[in-house]
Amino acid sequence: MSSSFEGWHRASAGLPAHFAARVSGRVRVPLFSCMVAYAAPLGLPLDGLTFHGGDTLWFAARSASKPGFPAGGEEAAECWSLVSTPGYACREIASTPMQDADGSFVPQSDDYLNSVPGPTLLAAFAEAVAPMLEAAGRAMPSVVYSQAQRWGSAMPSAPSWEGAPVELMGVTYQAAIPPLMRPRPPGDEADFVASDEQRLYYAGDFCSRRAPGFEAAALSAADAAAHVVRQLASD
């Protein structure tokens, strides 16, 4: 999605304005994430958590729960991925913008990421799992590594969902947690953007009317590839 931004954004692909406009109007759901490694396993009886009622942390997942991931022992470090709420991300982007006063892109720096959003997400996670650790008679292991990341265009918001849009420096973001399960709307509209005359094709979940995520992105890419094959065959 960032590639459809105007030239101020470092990830801009320089797409023609009339082409990019077919995607850039989708409202962005921004997030911050943090990868953290603890010196030892937390010993939690689950691989992931969602957090309700808070305004900072949305969900967390244990990296070793991925299929095929090698199992570690009791002394091995344990990694978790922490993901913020869209509301927290909007507040952070408002206080530390992605653009400066003249509209130039402001790169994220590790000094900022690992001193503001990273520690905030770590603290929220520690507070949330503290009761489970206490019940199991375990202490929170020390952090041996952490790295936060700004994800300004993490997901697209559903066009039909009102939510809580926020405009920051000319870009509309969604501050509310979006519905992640929704049926694809009826109709024959393509799940990709194409300009056969210019040989430009854009795929991904921002082009799709399905729920955002890997599945929508992969199906969008498959549909776009099939369209290109048909175009080549007709030529």
Image (tube, rainbow, N blue to C red):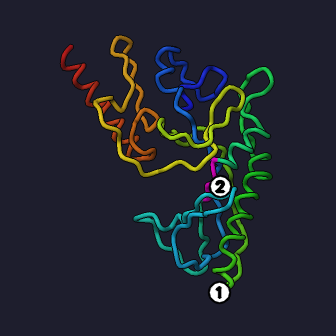
Q: Which residue is mark 2?
A: 34
Q: Main secondary structure of the magenta part?
A: strand
N-term-proximal mark, 1 vs 2: 2
Left or right: 180, with 148 as reference point = left
Does residue 135 lie above or below 140 as drawn? below
Q: Which residue is mark 1?
A: 135
Label 1, secondary structure: give it. helix
Tell me how far mark 1 sits from mark 2, CA to CA: 26 Å
Residue type, numbered disc 1: Ala
> Could you tell me residue 11's position as x and y percent?
59, 29
Provide the residue span drawn in magenta: 82-86
Q: Nearer the viewer, residue 171 or 200?
A: 171
Residue at image position (75%, 35%) is 97
Judge the density around disc 1: few (<14), some (14-19), many (≥20) Cα neighbours within 10 Å.
few
Residue at image position (40%, 40%) is 217
Q: Quadrant of the C terminus?
A: top left
Residue at image position (47%, 35%) is 206
Label 2, secondary structure: give it. strand
